Image: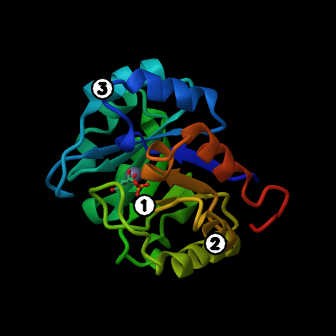
Amino acid sequence: MNHLVAPSVLAANYRNLQADFDMVNRSEADWFHVDIMDGRFVPNISFGMFIVEFMKKMAEKPLDVHLMILEPEKYIDDFRKAGADMITVHYEACPHLHRTIQQIKESGAKASVALNPHTPVSFLSEVIEDLDMVLLMSVNPGFGGQKFIYNTIPKIKQLREMCIVRNTNTLIEIDGGVGLQNAEEILRAGANVLVAGSSVFASQNPTETIAKLKVIGRGEVWV
Ligand code: DX5
Ligand code: ZN
């Protein structure tokens, strides 16, 4: 499959979100990546479902909602109602992960689990068949604009291997420090969804950066 690009709106201009949403709507991007931070699971606070509801009105592409919050099971239905098409919860925040995944699916959203940089891919072994996507954090979650952690590359390969062995179509999304400088290596390792925040919104020409991220490796089959 051709890989997907999901600009992270955490890096958008909040004085004029409509303009940035229009830009992404008209660009070659596939999804909007929406980061929810609670100041407890991660040291930063972003915004809640009220804002997501407005984002849904502006977005003409799916909302990929990344919950960096404790007890995400309490809010899944709210985020689904607000317009989330894909919901990602963190492995590290879910003692009853299997139940939480089922809850996401019952809400009607696609289900995804995120792993922090220190969490081994093998910890998803018992739920991989239930997942539409796995998000590998390539920075410690909480802030945009951080440096890509290189140990993510072998994790991508391991996860790709697990998906092949188990015969699943699970998407592999990479989040944090992704840009034109490392996208090819990430895709080659087996990822197929790139989240890009500052590398898109802080670039001279965001539409063009998205187009460049989309075109990398086009025509080559790596996974
Ligand atoms: C980090 C968030 C990311 C962030 C990525 O905790 O999950 O989605 O917005 O930002 P960049 O692409 O700037 O690293
Ligand atoms: Zn994210």
| Image height of 164 relative to 51, above or below | below
| Residue 19 picture location, percent across and down | 45, 23
Residue pictured at 49% horizontal, 35% vertical: 85
List the residue tagged with mark 2: 185
For ligand 1, tell me if the residue under mark 2 lies within 8 Å.
no
For ligand 1, tell me if the residue under mark 1 lies within 8 Å.
yes
What amino acid is found at the position of numbered circle 2 in the picture? Answer: Glu
List the residue tagged with mark 1: 176
Camera-side residue of 15 and 220:
15
| Residue 51 picture location, percent across and down | 29, 27
| Residue 143 picture location, percent across and down | 29, 56
Q: Quadrant of the C terminus?
A: bottom right
Q: Tag 2's secondary structure?
A: helix
Gap between marks 1 and 2 measured at Cα: 14 Å
What amino acid is found at the position of numbered circle 3 in the picture? Answer: Arg
**Picture quadrant where residue 53 is located:** top left
Mark 3 packing: few (<14 Cα in 10 Å), some, or many (20+)?
few
